[in-house]
Image (cartoon, rainbow, N blue to C red):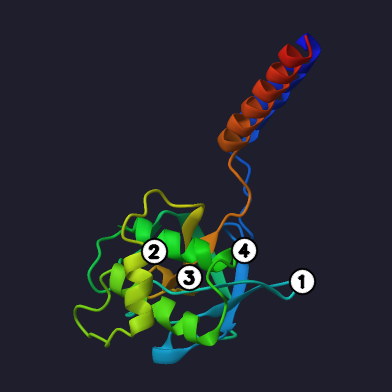
Amino acid sequence: MKKLLVGFVMVAMGLLLISPVASAYPVSVGDRIILTQGIGGANNGGSFNVDLVGDSTGVLFNTFCLERNEYFNPGVAMYVGSITGSASNGGYSGGNPDPISSATAYLYYRWATGLIANTAANANDLQLAIWSLEGEMAQYPIMLTAGANAFISSAATAQGFYGVQVMNLYGSYDPTRGYYNPKQSQLVYNAVPEPATMLLFGLGLLGLVGVGRKLKQ
């Protein structure tokens, strides 16, 4: 038991030490990606397929946009400028940066993990729900569908961010303005637990081992 405890502590410390630099997201800051239309697509929204430039895997995952007043050209490479909890520039009603809501994170987590069936109808409803939750409907409203309202209601008590963050995307450099042109901000899901979560899980397993030893005695 003593050796097991020492071994686990060493592994846990290693996880915590590498956590600041480890990234389990399917894309990283500085990557070049291409977005193409995925299933759904009503109202010029998602879902959108994400493909990493120079990678032979094909579509990595699909995503949804957060801002209705920023655009991109499907099939044209863009840079991942940052992966954070907020959208840059904030769309119609947000600040800069504009943090995503827990409800949006919850719904996209459920989509990314298949808890929401990945159908065209659900994609259209989910995009409307996300725009509504992020305050993108106030200036140019779109009628919410029954499905979108159902998604919004299901996320009413959401707390936390469920491994979901925002990819802030940029296009080509604009020399007249002196910066890279901002494009859409899209959602991304981290399917791998953070090191702190893994540490808690390991402690739980260690506790079960201890209980088992006591029962044998």
Circle number at residue 57:
1
Which marked residue is nearer to the observer: mark 2 or mark 1? 2
Which marked residue is nearer to the observer: mark 3 or mark 1? 1
What residue would you read off at disc 3? 170
The CA distance from mark 2 to mark 1 is 28 Å
Residue sitting at x 27%, y 75%: 136
Looking at the image, which is closer to me, 69 or 39? 39
Residue sitting at x 29%, y 84%: 144
Q: Is residue 184 visible in the rendered structure shown here?
A: yes
Marked residue nearer the N-terminal end (4 or 2): 4
Circle number at residue 31:
4
Marked residue nearer the N-terminal end (2 or 1): 1
Amino acid type shown at disc 1: Thr
The CA distance from mark 3 to mark 4 is 11 Å
Amino acid type shown at disc 4: Asp
Amino acid type shown at disc 3: Tyr
Marked residue nearer the N-terminal end (2 or 3): 2
The CA distance from mark 4 to mark 1 is 15 Å
Q: Within the image, what quadrant is residue 217 found in?
A: top right
Q: In the rendered view, tell whether residue 215 sits above or below residue 15.
A: above
Element on which disc 4 rests:
loop
Marked residue nearer the N-terminal end (4 or 1): 4
Q: Is residue 70 visible in the rendered structure shown here?
A: no
Quarter containing the N terminus: top right
Circle number at residue 104:
2
Residue 99, percent from left and from top: 33, 56
In the rendered structure, are the residues bearing label 2 and label 1 in contact, judged by CB atoms less than 8 Å apart? no
Q: Residues within 10 Å of mark 1 (few under 14, many from 20)?
A: few
The CA distance from mark 4 to mark 2 is 24 Å
